[in-house]
Amino acid sequence: MTEDILESLRIETPEQAMVLLNPLRADIAARLATPASAAEVARAIGEAPQRINYHLKALEKAGLVRRVGTRQVRNLVEVLYQAVAKTFILSDQLGMKPETVRRLKDQGSLSHLVQTAERIKQDALLLMEHSDEGQDIPSASLQFQVTLRDAQERHAFVEEYAALVRQLTAKYRKPANEAEPADPYQVVLAVYPQIDQSSGGND
């Protein structure tokens, strides 16, 4: 039932961009990397199914999600939706005000950050259960701070950081047809401003 989806889709039209301007719609799209119904998404984010269904219609009309099947649940038939891509990249050529484009990019990134954090939490809890059962669970984590003065420097840092990580992961990526078994590991990268807890602002 899961269909192949793009790793990323460049948003080229203002119509699609305006749909993603709504933070709830951006969150819904981010959660649909795998098929789910309006009821499932509603339970995950604590919203009414009717409201989620309304926003799904808007995302579907904009070509950002699609119907991929149905499922029988008791006496109801649920429609399953899936995003057309795992991530959405906003084009700088949208013809929109720079401030609007910046807001869209920030909201999309924050939505993905929340979804990723929730996935890490769920995976970690599951792995802890296996650890309690006596299994050896190897893991590693890395946390550090950098000082980035402006948008240009932030962009340069992210580009260089991503390039270095791609180079590193390519070195250790195993061919799909390799006979020797290898355990897959999840790698997650995130960059966001540190919050000053005392004042409620950013450092």
Image (cartoon, rainbow, N blue to C red):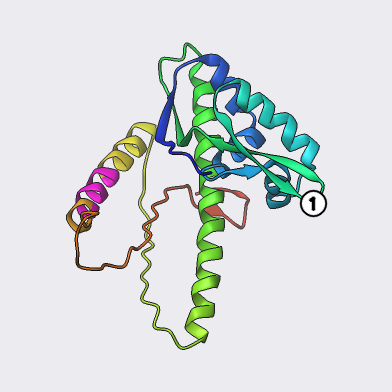
**Is 87 left, or right, of 21 in this rendering?**
left
- Which residue is drawn at the image coordinates 17% and 55% (left, top)? 171
- Which residue is drawn at the image coordinates 62% and 44% (left, top)? 36
**Is 33 left, or right, of 153 in this rendering?**
right
The percent position of residue 123, horizontal first and vertical second, equals 51, 65
Q: Is residue 132 magenta?
A: no
- Which residue is drawn at the image coordinates 57% and 57% (left, top)? 118
SS for callout 1: loop
Q: Classify residue 55 by image quadrant.
A: top right
Q: Among all residues in the image, which is located at the extreme right?
A: 75
Instruction: Using the image, determine if residue 111 lies above or below residue 129.
Output: above
- Main SS of the magenta segment? helix
Q: Along the line of sight, which residue is nearer the eye, 147 or 35?
A: 35
Q: Classify residue 173 by image quadrant.
A: bottom left
- Mark 1, other Cα within 10 Å: few <14 / some 14–19 / many ≥20: few
Q: Along the line of sight, which residue is nearer the eye, 202 or 107?
A: 107
Q: Among all residues in the image, which is located at the extreme bottom?
A: 134
Report the magenta residues as a range.
Answer: 161-169
Q: Among all residues in the image, which is located at the extreme top?
A: 95
Q: Along the line of sight, which residue is nearer the eye, 146 or 74?
A: 74
The percent position of residue 181, horizontal first and vertical second, equals 25, 68
The percent position of residue 117, horizontal first and vertical second, equals 53, 56
Say which amino acid is labelled 1.
Answer: Arg
Q: Is residue 167 magenta?
A: yes
**Is 10 left, or right, of 32 in this rendering?**
left
Instruction: Using the image, determine if residue 134 lies above or below residue 92.
Output: below
- Which residue is drawn at the image coordinates 44% and 36% (left, top)? 5
For the image, the number of numbered tags is: 1
Where is mark 1, residue-wise? 74
The percent position of residue 76, horizontal first and vertical second, equals 79, 44
